[in-house]
Image (cartoon, helix red, strand yellow):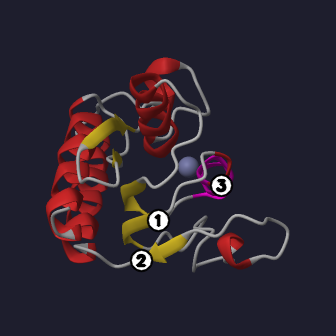
Amino acid sequence: MRSDEFYMHRALEQARLAEEAGEVPVGAVVVDADGAIVGAGYNAPVSGHDPSAHAEVRALRDAGARLGNYRLDGCTLFVTLEPCLMCTGAIIHARLARVVYGAAEPRSGMVESKANLFAQPWYNHRVEVVGGVLAGRVARQLKGFFAARRDGRAAGAEDD
Ligand SMILES: [Zn+2]
């Protein structure tokens, strides 16, 4: 197993793929107990016409397909942004051991910002959580994306 920062850089690479596709840059990778990357995904709800196509869900699907199991016991999810309501649910269903995220998401984050769903007593499964890994780099990437989009609009580009 390498450092959390190493895997967060891989998640940031996924986020760049989202940005190149015109999607809000969020990326994720799934790492098994031996430190191998077994799944990856980036945010793509707009292009895929799919409200569930967040980076986390796509990375979990990728890992499940690769491992041939919907339960990802012992695996860790690295994601650039604090997970939302849907993704915290998917993480619990996948039985992940650990979640590591970069920047907090003040508007919809369900780990520290709006609530901590992982700390609720409704589920037997416990997920270890670490936040703030490479948070500054993640924040810069998001800021750059939204600034570029604003500039595009100011220049007369089509609004989505
Ligand atoms: Zn989500």
Image: 43 above or below 89: above
Query: Mark 3 falls on what kind of element?
Result: helix
User: 155 or 43, which is in the foreground?
Assistant: 43
Amino acid type at image mark 2: Val
Q: Residues within 10 Å of mark 3 (few under 14, many from 20)?
A: some
Q: Where does residue 47 sit, x and y in percent of width and height?
A: 43, 21
CB of mark 3 within 8 Å of CB of mark 2? Answer: no
Amino acid type at image mark 3: Ile
Which callout, 3 or 1, points at the residue further toward the start of the chain? Answer: 3
Tell me if residue 142 can be seen.
yes
Q: Residue furthest front?
A: 34
Residue at mark 1: 98
In which quarter of the view is residue 39 placed? top left
Q: CA distance from mark 1 to mark 2?
A: 8 Å
CB of mark 1 within 8 Å of CB of mark 2? Answer: yes
Residue at mark 2: 130
User: 128 or 158, which is in the foreground?
Assistant: 128
Quick check: 102 left or right of 47? left
Query: Mark 1 falls on what kind of element?
Result: strand
| Figure quadrant of the N terminus | bottom left
User: 64 or 27, which is in the foreground?
Assistant: 64
CB of mark 3 within 8 Å of CB of mark 1? Answer: no
Q: Which residues are magenta?
A: 84-91
- Asked if the stretch drawn in magenta spans residue 41, the answer is no
Q: Residue at x 29, y 36 (%)?
A: 18
Q: Residue at x 36, y 71 (%)?
A: 103
Residue at mark 3: 92
Tell me if residue 152 can be seen.
no
Q: Residue at x 68, y 47 (%)?
A: 93
